Image: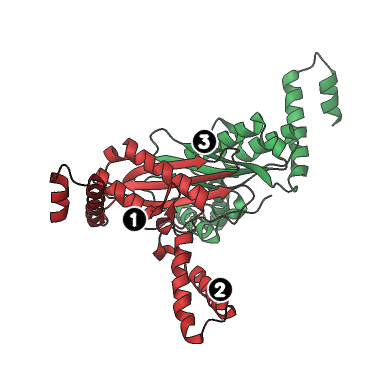
Chain colours: A green, B red
Amino acid sequence: MMECKSALTESNGDLAEAEVVLRKRGIASASKKATRTTKQGVIGTYVHPGAQLGVMLEVNCESDFVARTDDFQALVHDLAMQIAAADPQFLRKEDVTPAALEKEREIQRARALAEGKPEKMIDKITEGRLNKFYEEVCLYEQPFIKEPTTTVADLIKTKIAKLGENISVSRFVRFKVGDQAAAETPAAGNE
Amino acid sequence: MMECKSALTESNGDLAEAEVVLRKRGIASASKKATRTTKQGVIGTYVHPGAQLGVMLEVNCESDFVARTDDFQALVHDLAMQIAAADPQFLRKEDVTPAALEKEREIQRARALAEGKPEKMIDKITEGRLNKFYEEVCLYEQPFIKEPTTTVADLIKTKIAKLGENISVSRFVRFKVGDQAAAETPAAGNE
C-alpha cells in the first residue's frame, strides 16, 4: 500500500508502474467484494453475422445504476464475444462436472503413458495438464480474447475495482445451428 | 381438394372462403413435410427494452436459401417475442417431463376434489385440465400472441406451406435477470 501511495504522489514517477500497482490494489479490493450479493444486472446477447451462432448470458452486479453504465454494458458485450469465440463449457472450475473432469483425467493419463513418461510422474503430469483443461473450458479461466495475457476472471475483477460493485456471470448459453448438443451451462450460484 | 379447386377457379366466388380452403390445404401439405430433416436455420434473439429479459432460439428449415428469406426471419422474430411474452417451459407436449406432468395432475386432481366434483368424474376432469396445461407450458400448443385464435404450431405450419420446407424450433432459452431457476429447455430432436 505504501509503494502504491508513493507511486501516485510522485508525479514524475513511472506512471505505468503506478498503474500496475493501482490495478493490483483494485483487484485486491475487488476480491473483498466477491462475496457480495449480485441481484441486478442485464441479459446480453450476441449473434454472429449470418445468424449461425448466438450467445446469451446474464451478468449481475449489485445495483441497477451500475448495470446501466457504459462500462458494465461494454463488459457484457466483451463476455458475449468471448463466449462466441472461445466456446467455454462451464463458468468456473467448480462448475466442471465430475464426469467431464474424470474423462479429461483419463485422456491426459493415457497421453502421458503413451509419451513414455516415468510411472511416478504420471499423476503430477496429469494434474498439471488439467489446469490447461480448465483454461480451455471455464469462462473465468480463459485468456481474454481481446487481451490474451489476462484472464476473463481478471477482466471482471478490473471492472469490479472500477465500478465498486461485485460483478459475476451467472449463466450463459451458446447456440450453433445444427449443433443440438451445444453446451447449455447449468445455472451456477452467484459468487 | 375438389372444393378447393372450384373455389379457386370461380373468380366471383367467396375469396375469404377460398383462402380458408387454401390454408387448410397448405396445412395438410405442411403436415406431410413434417418428417423431413431440418439442418439449416438461424439463431434468433430478442432482448426486451431494459435488458432484464432475453430469449434465444434456434429455428430450423431444410435449406440455407429459405433460412435467409424475410418470411423465415419474421417467423423467428415472432417466435422469440412469443417466448418472451408467454414464457413456455417446453417445446412440445412430448417434451413435458413426467415429473412436471405428474405434479400438474396432482394439482388438478386436488382442485377437482376441493370443488366437490363427483368421484367418478375426477379422472376425466383432471385429464381435461391437463390439455389446458399443455396450452400454457408448450410453445407449440400456445395461442400465438399476435393472433390468439391460432396456435404456434399452426403459425409454423402456415409458414411451412408458404415456404415449401419443413420448419421446426429445436431449442430455446429465456433468461430473466435474477431468475436463476428460469426454464432452460432441454434440446429436443427435430421433428
State the mark number for residue A81.
3
Vertical comparison of B28 with A152: above or below: below
Name the kind of residue labelled 3 in the image: Met
Residue at the spot of label 2: B107
Name the kind of residue labelled 1 in the image: Asn
Name which quarter of the figure residue B151 lies in: bottom left
Vertical comparison of B41 with A127: above or below: above
N-terminal label among 1 and 2 = 2
Q: Which residue is at the front of the view, B80 or A40? A: B80
Are callouts 1 and 3 both on one chain?
A: no
Contact (Cβ within 8 Å) of mark 3 with mark 2: no
Image spot of residue A131 (x, y percent): 58, 48
Q: Is residue A33 visible?
A: yes
Name the subunit of mark 3.
A
Q: Which residue in the rendered view is the most extreme toward the front?
A: B12
- Number of residues whose C-alpha sits closer than 10 Å to that of mark 1, classed few (under 14), some (14–19) or many (20 or more): many
Quadrant for the N terminus of chain A, please.
Answer: top right
Residue at the spot of label 1: B190
